[in-house]
Image (tube, rainbow, N blue to C red):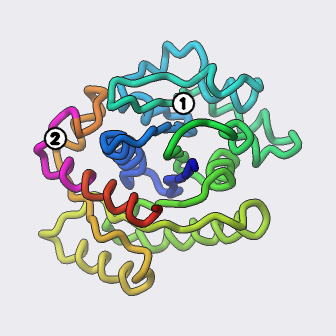
């Protein structure tokens, strides 16, 4: 049975792509068959897995807009057999081109039917537009990365309101798997306060694993590698490995 997990937050710079790339790599390392789906026109997930997004023959745009079979665009990566459905800036036109199409919110869901993977991870763009709605409509579960900073809870409320609407209108099965705190600096009192506030509001949904600020995590994407291959002994690597175990426990 394939489990589809959307990783979403409409705020940019919260570690969403870093979480997708590294969670995908560590899930694959456990022997799971993994597909990472990049539906962000910035294509940072594709870059982070070593794919040159400017030299793609086919991308998710061709699947969603042109109607290509999803297997046409899937690329095999060098990381534990993990596969990637890549994106680049061409995808930015998809929201406009699909605006008047029927069942436009279900394009991604229909594309991902009958694929042979244990987990499909969808990296959503930092917005609440049609591409993110496609990700949420396709998913069984949702992971929300939240940076431990002042505005974290405000953005979280907006996203959860969208999730509620998606549940009511498009995908009643969508489950909030958990909220993961990212870019955490334990030396600041603000980070601790944000953690406690989220814990108070979502006691059963907060992942135990907290992803710290880590220079090696920040460097890894520029080498096109997940942290498991860039520096597997770093603090960031240890925490994403732990998060992967926690995700498997919650889902399975």
Mark 1 residue element: strand
- Residue at image coords 56%, 27%: 89
Q: CA distance from mark 1 to mark 2?
A: 25 Å
Residue 28: image quadrant is top left
- Residue at image coords 57%, 65%: 159
In magenta, the rendered stretch is: 229-240
The image shows residue 170 at horizontal and vertical percentages of 76, 60
Q: Which residue is mark 2?
A: 232
Vertical relation: 126 (above or below) 172:
above
- Residue at image coords 23%, 77%: 192
Q: Nearer the viewer, residue 6 or 39?
A: 6
Q: Nearer the viewer, residue 133 or 24?
A: 24
N-term-proximal mark, 1 vs 2 = 1
**Pointer 1 local density, CA inside 10 Å: few below 14, some 14–19, many at least 20:** many
Residue 189: image quadrant is bottom left
Q: Which residue is mark 1?
A: 85
- Overall secondary structure of the magenta section: helix
**Pointer 2 local density, CA inside 10 Å: few below 14, some 14–19, many at least 20:** some
Q: Is residue 78 left or right of residue 53?
A: left
The image shows residue 210 at horizontal and vertical percentages of 26, 64
């Amino acid at each position: 049975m394939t489990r589809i997990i959307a990783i979403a937050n409409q705020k940019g710079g919260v570690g969403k792509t870093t979480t997708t790339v590294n969670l995908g790599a560590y899930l694959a390392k456990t022997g799971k068959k993994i597909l990472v789906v990049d539906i962000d026109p910035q294509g940072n997930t594709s870059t982070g897995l070593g794919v040159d997004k400017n030299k793609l023959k086919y991308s998710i745009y061709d699947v969603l807009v042109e109607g290509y079979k999803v297997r046409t665009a899937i690329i095999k990566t060098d990381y534990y057999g993990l596969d990637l459905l890549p994106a680049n800036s061409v995808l930015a036109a998809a929201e406009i081109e699909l605006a008047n199409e029927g069942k436009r919110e279900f394009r991604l869901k229909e594309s991902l039917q009958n694929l042979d993977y244990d987990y499909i991870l969808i990296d959503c763009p930092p917005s609440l537009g049609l591409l993110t709605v496609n990700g949420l409509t396709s998913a069984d579960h949702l992971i929300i990365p939240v940076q431990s900073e002042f505005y974290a809870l405000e953005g979280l409320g907006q996203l959860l309101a969208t999730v509620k609407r998606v549940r009511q209108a498009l995908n009643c099965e969508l489950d909030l798997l958990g909220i993961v705190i990212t870019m955490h600096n334990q030396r600041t009192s603000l980070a601790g306060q944000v953690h406690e506030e989220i814990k108070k509001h979502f006691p059963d949904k907060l992942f135990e694993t907290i992803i710290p600020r880590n220079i090696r995590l920040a460097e890894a994407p520029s080498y096109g590698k997940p942290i498991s291959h860039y520096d597997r002994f770093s603090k960031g690597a240890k925490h994403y490995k732990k998060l992967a175990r926690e995700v498997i426990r919650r889902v399975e």
